[in-house]
Amino acid sequence: KSAFLSDAGRGARRQITTATTTAATMASTALQRDAVVVAVLLAYAVAFPYTKVEESFNVQAVHDVWHVGVRNAAAFDHVAFPGVVPRTFLMPIATAVLGTPCFVLLRAAAAAAGVATTK
């Protein structure tokens, strides 16, 4: 009877240890992901200190082209928030096309590392 309880106790300890290790691994992964985001933000702040509000439209447009797709232009942010100045999408589309290989490679690397991505 005591051997049975001892085995049951060891199994419970193993489950608790596994759960603790899994939680610690997930927390470590989240911290690493947060550190990468902060590092990228700092790199952008240092590399491009004079980016203005007007340029944020182009950044958002490139994001929309990558994540929404050109065929679903009605879902782009500029449709919901058009602004007062008419804008062209030629340069954001060109930027998105030129940057797509990097985007695809980064997505593949994230998937291989088990990091969740959108879409």
Image (cartoon, rainbow, N blue to C red):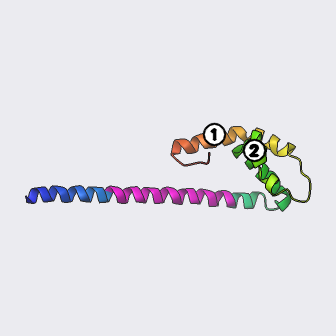
- Percent from the top left, x then y, of residue 60? 77, 53
Viewer-proximal residue, 13 or 70?
70
- Under mark 2, the amino acid is Val
| Label 2 environment density (alpha carbons within 10 Å; few <14, some 14–19, many ≥20) | many
Viewer-proximal residue, 43 or 61?
61
Question: For residue 44, which quarter of the picture?
Answer: bottom right
Residue ID at (53%, 41%)? 112
Question: For residue 106, which quarter of the picture?
Answer: top right
Q: Is residue 4 above or below residue 97?
A: below
Question: For residue 9, which quarter of the picture?
Answer: bottom left
Quadrant the C terminus occupies: top right
Magenta stretch, residue numbers: 18-41
Viewer-proximal residue, 28 or 114?
114
The span from disc 2 to disc 1 (Cα, nearest Å) is 17 Å
Residue ID at (81%, 58%)? 81
- Under mark 1, the amino acid is Leu
Front of the two marks 2 and 1: 2
Furthest-right residue in this view: 85
- Percent from the top left, x then y, of residue 35? 58, 59
Q: Which residue is mark 2?
A: 65
Q: Which residue is mark 1?
A: 105
Decide whether residue 38 is among the magenta residues. yes
Residue ID at (16%, 55%)? 7
Residue 7 visible within the image: yes
- Percent from the top left, x then y, of residue 14? 27, 56
Q: Earlier in the sequence, mark 2 or mark 1?
A: 2
Does the magenta stretch mainly form a helix, a strand or a loop? helix
Element at label 2: helix
